[in-house]
Image: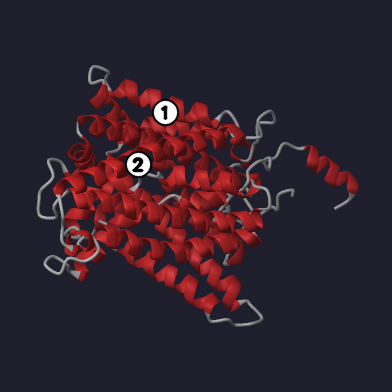
């Protein structure tokens, strides 16, 4: 590239590198939520017959394979498109396009289900305010936070992480006090959450794991920020793996504390809000209300982070002309953000809050997420094993193990989610066929960003 061309390229608006390693880790933890296992606790407890800790740990091992694949691919392609870019560049542009289209559903649905859950949770605090008003409020809140610029978003993440950490610590303290009040207990009381011979069933534990793995959904959002990170080839890999490890350890401690408080055979007043009832038993009504509010705040952080990731994914696809470049590939010069995409995802979050149920939205998130996970694992296998000059077995085992585990989870999605997800994929293929006049032209033009 000539010096004149490079100077012109530098003058164009582009994403700004402003984030360090721990900014990424905080962003990933908030996107997943430090309280991620709490909403799922009752359902997993019911399916796995009380072995929630075991399912969380199995899920952590499973997702670490995929996290390593994400991090290694980010070293090669430090771009904003994440899985879409990795699959498109390493396997085939058309495969990357389909992956990106599936991810777009996943990423755009995540803010929607967060708006839905936040609106209902806020309604429990102020029931006189209608659901529609709360939906408008939270959709506007997520959008406003993401219009401030990436550095401000990082600071918000740090504050949210600190606040939720305090509440989780209060829950641990209340659990210890509750257990001490029970008096001396046998060793089986403390080992039961991991393995109780009276209720343990391996098939049921695997069923519970397929739900518990939702605790980790969202870690891949870190890789969408590759163009806004200092030293992305190092920090994306470290942040992705660290986020999975920290989430897994913290989630295990959270559900272990809850299982010590609540007997395995005792039914919950409400399965969906089981953890809140556990908190009430451990610490009283004040802790019940604090945990309920914390889950609301956590969902606000998750929704904001999900919208952030969705906007960056759409930007990556727009810049590569997989989506209309003039709209999706535009950067707002003042704050160096893809403003059009932030506003679009905000509008979709509001509309979806009135059109979808929380359950269907959550299932569709899994459909897109696991297609992306499978694609990234195959891209890592292709890059580091099939095309490598030296065939190292570890470079085949890690991505293939990640692919097989993700495929097993994806295959067991319920029929409504698979049908709706495949319909979305079909729409993407039809659009791609129209855009390329029957796939006779180049579908995607990948571009390298400025360092």
Q: Quadrant of residue 402?
A: bottom left
Q: CA distance from mark 1 to mark 2?
A: 27 Å
Look at the picture and state if 125 lies above or below 162: above
Figure check: 2 above or below 96: above
Q: Residue at image x 28%, y 63%?
A: 54
Residue farthest to the right, as pictured: 3
- Residue 346 visible from this viewpoint: yes
Q: Is residue 410 visible?
A: no
Q: Is residue 369 left or right of residue 69?
A: left
Tell us which disc is closer to us: 1 or 2: 2
Picture quadrant of residue 332:
top right
- The percent position of residue 207, horizontal first and vertical second, equals 23, 62
Tag on residue 139?
A: 1
Most foreground residue, 313 or 68: 68
Q: Is residue 24 above or below residue 59?
A: above
Q: Is residue 174 left or right of residue 315?
A: left
Residue in the image at 39% along x and 61% along y: 60
Q: Farthest residue in the top direction?
A: 128
Instruction: Determine whether label 1 and label 2 are within 8 Å by CB.
Output: no
- Residue closer to the observer: 425 or 161: 161
The numbered dot on residue 168 is 2
What secondary structure is marked by label 1?
helix
Measured from the top left, where is residue 41 in percent x and y? 25, 49
- Local packing at callout 1 (Cα closer than 10 Å; few below 14, some 14-19, many 20+) is many
Q: Is residue 202 left or right of residue 337?
A: left
Horizontal and vertical percent for residue 126?
26, 20
- Residue, x 39% and y 71% (percent of image)? 404
Q: Mark 2: few, some, or many residues within 10 Å (few <14, many ≥20)?
A: some
Badge 1 or badge 2: first in the primary sequence = 1
Residue 309's spot in the image, x, y percent?
Answer: 51, 43
């Amino acid at each position: 590239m000539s010096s004149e061309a490079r100077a012109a390229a530098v003058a164009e608006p582009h994403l700004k590198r402003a984030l360090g390693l721990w900014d990424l880790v905080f962003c990933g933890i908030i996107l997943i939520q430090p309280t991620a296992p709490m909403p799922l606790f009752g359902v997993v407890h019911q399916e796995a017959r009380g072995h929630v800790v075991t399912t969380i740990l199995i899920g952590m091992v499973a997702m670490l394979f995929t996290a390593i694949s994400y991090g290694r691919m980010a070293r090669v392609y430090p771009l904003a498109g994440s899985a879409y870019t990795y699959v498109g560049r390493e396997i085939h542009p058309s495969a990357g396009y389909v992956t990106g289209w599936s991810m777009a559903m996943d990423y755009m649905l995540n803010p929607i289900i967060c708006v839905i859950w936040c609106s209902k949770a806020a309604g429990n605090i102020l029931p006189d305010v209608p659901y529609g008003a709360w939906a408008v409020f939270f959709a506007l809140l997520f959008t406003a936070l993401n219009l401030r610029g990436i550095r401000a978003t990082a600071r918000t993440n740090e504050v949210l992480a600190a606040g939720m950490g305090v509440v989780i610590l209060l829950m641990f303290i209340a659990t210890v006090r509750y257990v001490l009040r029970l008096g001396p207990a046998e060793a089986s009381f403390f080992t039961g959450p991991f393995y109780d011979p009276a209720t343990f069933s391996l098939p049921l534990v695997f069923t519970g794991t397929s739900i518990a793995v939702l605790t980790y959904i969202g870690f891949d959002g870190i890789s969408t920020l590759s163009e806004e990170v200092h030293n992305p080839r190092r920090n994306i890999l470290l942040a992705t793996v660290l986020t999975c490890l920290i989430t897994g350890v913290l989630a295990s401690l959270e559900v272990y504390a809850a299982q010590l408080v609540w007997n395995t055979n005792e039914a919950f007043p409400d399965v969906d809000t089981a953890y809140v009832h556990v908190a009430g038993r451990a610490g009283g009504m004040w802790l019940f209300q604090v945990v309920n509010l914390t889950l609301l705040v956590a969902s606000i952080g998750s929704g904001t982070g999900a919208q952030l990731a969705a906007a960056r994914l759409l930007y990556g696809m727009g810049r590569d002309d997989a989506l209309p470049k003039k709209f999706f590939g535009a950067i707002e010069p003042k704050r160096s953000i893809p403003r059009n995409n932030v506003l679009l995802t905000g509008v979709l979050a509001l509309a979806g809050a009135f059109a979808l149920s929380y359950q269907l939205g959550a299932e569709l998130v899994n459909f897109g997420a696991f297609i992306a996970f499978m694609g990234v694992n195959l891209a890592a296998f292709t890059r580091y094993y099939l095309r490598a000059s030296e065939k190292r077995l570890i470079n085949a085992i890690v991505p293939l193990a990640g692919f097989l585990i993700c495929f097993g989870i994806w295959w067991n999605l319920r029929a409504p989610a698979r049908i709706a997800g495949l319909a979305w994929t079909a729409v993407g293929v039809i659009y791609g066929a129209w855009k390329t006049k029957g796939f006779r032209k180049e579908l995607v033009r990948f571009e390298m960003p400025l360092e």
